[in-house]
Image (cartoon, rainbow, N blue to C red):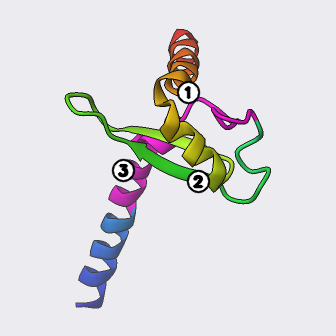
Amino acid sequence: MKSLLTALLILGLASAGLKAADSPAATYPLSTCVVSGEGLNDMGAPIDYVYKQEGKPDRLVKFCCKQCTGKFKKDPVKYLSKLDAAEAAAAKK
């Protein structure tokens, strides 16, 4: 019984690792905040925000602080264009 539980635990951890590597966070193209330009870790852990737009897939956007989240919400198109450009540059590599 112990070996079965161990095998299930290992299998669970292995599959969790695969999912994490395939997540948008693992492939985020920027190391800076789309609003301020500051490093994502300059003010502590980055703030992850999921931008939802009807008819389009959800998008992960990372900020250096909570204040930048508010600025993003006022004009998301402006900041998403920066993210789009970084994603396009990363796809060319």
Q: Identify the residue under disc 1.
A: 79
Label 3 SS: helix
Pair 3/2: label in front: 2
- The answer for how far apart the CA atoms under marks 1 and 2 are is 15 Å
First-in-chain label (3 vs 2)? 3
Q: Residue at x 77, y 55 (%)?
A: 43
Work out how far the residue at label 3 is from the one at label 1, CA to CA, in angstroms.
Answer: 27 Å
**Which is more toward the observer, 1 or 87?**
87
Q: Look at discs 3 and 1 and give the one toward the viewer.
A: 1
Say which mark, if any, is on residue 47.
2
Reading the image, the residue beneath label 3 is 19
Q: Magenta residues, as a range?
A: 14-37
- Give the percent coordinates (x, y) of residue 29: 58, 29
Q: Mark 2 or mark 1, which is nearer the start of the sequence?
A: 2
- Residue 35 quadrant: top right
Looking at the rendered image, the disc whose residue lies closer to the viewer, 1 or 2, is 1
Residue occupying the point 29% across, 90% down: 2
Pointer 2: residues within 10 angstroms few (<14), some, or many (20+)?
Answer: some
Residue 46: say if magenta.
no
Query: Between disc 3 and disc 1, whose residue precedes?
Result: 3
21 relative position to 89: left or right: left
